[in-house]
Image (cartoon, grey):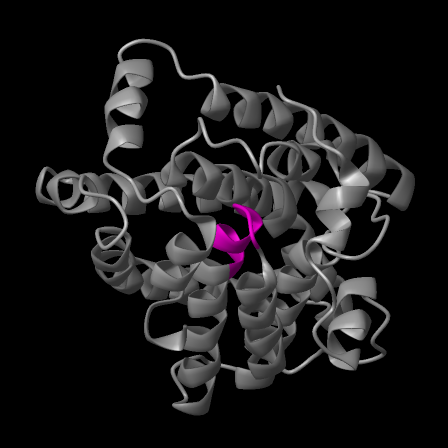
Amino acid sequence: MTTGNHDETDRAHPFPTWRSRRLIRGDSVSPVAIADVAEELRAVARASDDAVGYFAAVYNRVTSTIATSIAEGRFDDGPRMERFASTFAELYTRNLGPNPVRARCWQAGFDVAGDRDLIILQHLLIGFNAHINHDLAQAVVAVADATGDLQAVKSDFDAINLLLGEMTLGVLSDLDRVSRWASEAGSFGGGRFFNFSLVKARDQAWRTAERLLPLSAADRAVEMAELDRLTSVLAYLITRPTLPGRLVVSVARRLEERDPRKVTAALLGARA
């Protein structure tokens, strides 16, 4: 996998506000309001001049939708969901500060953020791979540790699956503005396949959380190191698809917008 300059990557994504520094360090005493997290992600996306902005833009949409849903009372326990969603998001934002200590699966994405041979979807999948397959179980365990009730988190965990499914078509529509293949992929069931894959990954994350919860801190660290290794392998496979995937990527690359800022603006949608 291509190795990038970590210092250059960090300088390319400055902290937009004092709140950003608090979020990214992860040193807040209480859970950060999810609306603030959404604004942070939007600022990160807009400040990016490479593919780091892609995942931040889509994640901004996710967190904004969660914030709206909390306000509308769509979750059984709004404050608990806010804690869960902000804890989950901070596992991503902590990778954005100066000289961060990143998991290998996250470093894989930053290493290839400037690689123009990868298509937009590959960059997004690397982010989803790290955040769901590596981070999600940690967020579940953190909230369960704080509340003392793993099963109470399950209903909100499942509700997020529904929200993500509802958002897929909108993201594909905006992606089609900068790639001339997204709508065709959607018409052939690409959106349904993405949702199915997302649900499967989240189900696996839940099982991982169940396995982690009763462990000691030392044993959790061992489990997470192995999970990071496996997730890093998946990241590598995303960047190096085999046939026929390699041919699909080659064709898709010719149909895509090449300016990262324009891609990020499209992925932000109406929030750009």
Tell me: 22 left or right of 120.
Answer: right
Q: Position of residue 195 (x, y in %)?
A: 29, 47
Vertical relation: 238 (above or below) 74: above
Foreground pick, 118 / 233: 118
Vertical relation: 266 (above or below) 101: below
Foreground pick, 200 / 8: 8
Q: Is residue 45 magenta?
A: no
Q: Is residue 207 visible to the viewer in this orientation of the structure?
A: yes
Q: Quadrant of residue 143?
A: bottom right
Taking the spot 67% from the left edge, 31% from the top edge, the residue there is 227
Query: Start and end of the magenta stretch?
Result: 49-56
Foreground pick, 137 / 26: 26
Q: Quadrant of the C terminus?
A: bottom left
Kindly give the residue lying farthest to the front in the view shown: 259
Q: Position of residue 256 (x, y in %)?
A: 29, 40
Kindly give the residue lying farthest to the left in the view shown: 187
Tell me: 203 left or right of 172.
Answer: right
Vertical relation: 106 (above or below) 225: below
Q: Main secondary structure of the magenta part?
A: helix
Q: Position of residue 137 (x, y in %)?
A: 63, 48
Taking the spot 72% from the left edge, 32% from the top edge, the residue there is 104
Kindly give the residue lying farthest to the top in the view shown: 243
Taking the spot 57% from the left edge, 37% from the top edge, the residue there is 114
Q: Quadrant of the N terminus?
A: top right
Kindly give the residue lying farthest to the right in the view shown: 218
Taking the spot 40% from the left edge, 17% from the top edge, the residue there is 241
Q: Is residue 213 visible to the viewer in this orientation of the structure?
A: no
Tell me: 222 left or right of 191.
Answer: right
Foreground pick, 99 / 147: 99
